[in-house]
Amino acid sequence: MRLVSAVVVILLSLSCRLVPGLPDDGDASLFRDKEVNFLAKELELFRNTGICRAEVTSTIGTCDIGESQPILNWIDLKRSSCYCDNLCSEYQDCCIDKVGFYNVKSLNWSCREVRGINVSRIPIYVYQKCPRNWNDEFTKGMCETEALERERLKMTFNHLQDLPVQSETTNIFYRNIYCAVCNGDTRLVKWETYLYCNGDSERSGDSFLDDPDFSNAVYVPRTMNFRRVKVNGRLRNCQINVKRFDLPNLVTNYGARLCKPVINTCPVGTDSDIKSKCNAYTSYIYRVPKPGREIYKNFHCALCNGVPIENLSCLDSYIGPVYGTPWGPTGRAPLTMLFDFNYQGGLEEIGNQSPCLLHEGQIWDPIFRKCQNFTCGTLYKREGSRCVPISISDENGLKNSCPKVILNSDDFHVLTDRSVYINRTMKYLAKDEYEVYRKENSVVLQIAICVDDTHLLPYSLVHSWLSAIVLSVSIICLILHLVVYGMLEKLRNRPGKILMSLAISLLCGHLFLLLGPYFRDIFWLCYFNGVLIHFGYFAAFSWMSVMAYDIHGTFSVTQTNNSNKSKIFLKYSLFAWLCTVCLVLLSIIIDNSLPKGNSFRPRYAEPTCWLNSKKGLLIFFVSPATILLIANIVLFGITAFHFRKVSRQTKMVNNFSDKVRYFLYLKLAVVLGLTWILGLVAGITRMDVFWYPFIILNGLQGALIFIAFTIKKNILNMLAIKLKIRSDKYRMGKSSGIKAAMYSSLSNLTTLQTTTSSQIPSLTNDKEMLKAVRKINPDTVLDEKRRVNAVPKG
């Protein structure tokens, strides 16, 4: 494929001979004369290269889809491909059909992230250059070199490098105070700052009144915060925030411009015409899979830098810091994502949930935070969950195929310039961003506005925190369970080994699900983490099925003696591990074989460290797991039937209570994973009433296994003897002996299974079953002796 990319670069270079290179600022008129021809040839060349062919968006960004107004939020920034406003030439981010109209000398802007208030990071254009005649190398270095880079090079750095400043006279945003100084601009806007530390209940503007001590504090550029700040005698992690750095205030009131950090240069030796095209216009192109986040100004920039065509995408898969992430607003991994497979209504990406039914004409209204019936406006009609055009000749309609919600007159104000102010969101919409839905005379009663992607909600904060808590508890319990079973050889019989294998699988899934958010910035590590989560949880389902089959074989009357019992566990292991490995390998192969835009790709690490495609999740995890769950349910029913039959026959001799039997049923349900059915129900219905019990019961499965199969009196006694806390002569006190040992075996599923499987032969009728149960139940002898002694002599 790299050969194909090289051929494309050669073709581009040849095409540059046919299409005149873009002129400098002085040749604007020449460019305008050839603009139409240039646009047509660029569109044709883009199609011929095959970039983004499998994606919905597979064209160069033009003013039809470009941004004509300042971008105010992350959702719009993610969706944008270029600008078409009057400032685009100054910032060099114009769409191809806007280039040439406003050719002015522009500064060499840099796109840098600043810490925000209502968002964690805000990417804005800043000026980060010192004049050539500036001689102070220290100030120049502190301006032009990022603090993170200076830290890596073991050079001096400080927090002022990450704090932008704004000129009062020109309104230019400088990267930091050093850039303003070297450019001779010392009349700066005085930011009002405050200190926010971990553990603060709210971001109070009076935080500096705590008189923090920074004498031993260390600034960390990667997180933009201070470590080891002493506040009221306690060491805390703190950050300095600017009160006015919030969206949309930073854009609307201070003139900041949101941006994407693009690569807009070609290597040395690249054809000059290709270099010119690379820097000529903006139509963002993205590299996937990405080791970091690579955005190119246009496809010429990507190809001249040697990016293979198959690794280019027109869709921005990056999930920014605004409005949470698919890992949840806390950055923690919710169990919800394991069964977030419902793509109904076009929700293709993991983490995008909609509480509404799009295919039934509903959409989530972010203003009133409830499901609303959506309309398509006067120019479009609804077909399923999409709006398709009827006519675009009516100038009074909103020319946008987005789903729209209706606002009543109490919810907005129409201003004199025909823009509207939305009361609840305090946002302004231009006259071409809404549609008059109903009016009487000259009074507007209702308007229709787009909601676009705002119906896609991140996972609930409660889901994330609850998952983190229960998974942490389970991980600790599973480790303790494995330690105890590893120390006590008597517990490592066949059922015990199966239970240990299940615990190892769950531990793998739980642990890497929790660690996933920390690996997200390193692509290969994130990819490997997603594979391990996939492997761990599906292996757990495989071992649950092995347990179900083994227990079913123990109590089934059709069981036959097996002379090769030592090989049974080996066969079980081959089944469970090989099935899991084959499924995960197939998933990886499909992920790297299908085109990047194919919805059936699992999409590991794009962007979360798990399967990111709902269709891929359904095919490679949910469906196989459901098949195993159904098999477990069937085997559980058969096992419960035979177990009840045995217990009824032995009640006269063993007093086998309903309480013990039901407790065993409960333990069977836990170990066979029947509670995972809630995940299927929750995934289909997308209702919190099912998500919460799913998270609690399955997140605590490791803890339930530990309680049911490890914290037993006989096991604790064995452990105490192993650790030499008690003498090996000690057994069970007054309750010691055959009867106590038998009760222990009834309370412990693995012991019971081993006992019955070793002593129940091939049973053909109830009479033989009763004899076998009496044989393995020594309490029968004790009961008979008591009856004999109770008979009066003589």
Image (cartoon, rainbow, N blue to C red):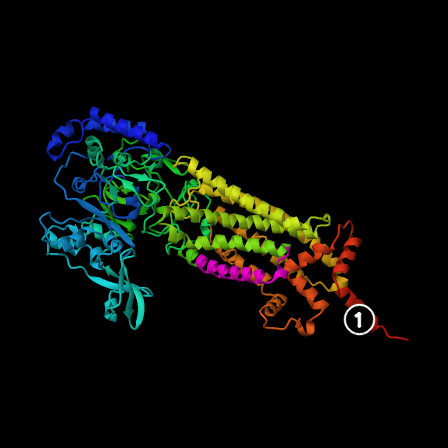
Residue 81 place in picture, x, y as percent = 27, 39
Where does the C terminus fall, quadrant-wise?
A: bottom right
477 within the magenta span: yes
Quarter location, residue 789: bottom right
Give the residue drawn at x 73%, y 48%: 560
Region rendered in magenta: 466-493
Badge 1 crowding class, 10 Å Cα cut-off, few under 14, some 14 to 19, many 20 or more, is few
**Residue 644 visible in the current orientation:** no
Quick one: SS at disc 1?
Answer: helix
Vertical order, 539 against 742 (above or below): above
Residue 408 place in picture, x, y as percent = 31, 47
Where does the N terminus fall, quadrant-wise?
A: top left
Give the residue drawn at x 65%, y 51%: 550
The secondary structure that most of the magenta stretch takes on is helix
Q: Residue furthest right?
A: 794
Vertical order, 727 against 270 (above or below): below
Residue 150 place in picture, x, y as percent = 23, 54
Q: In the drawing, does residue 573 fall left or right of residue 696? A: right
605 within the magenta span: no
**Residue 430 visible in the current orientation:** yes
Query: How many numbered marks, from 0 up?
Result: 1
User: Residue tagged by mark 1?
Assistant: 786
Residue 241 place in picture, x, y as percent = 24, 60
In depth, the one of 539 and 145 nearer the eye is 145
Q: In the drawing, does residue 585 fall left or right of residue 284? A: right
Q: Amino acid at mark 1?
A: Arg
Give the residue drawn at x 74%, y 60%: 776
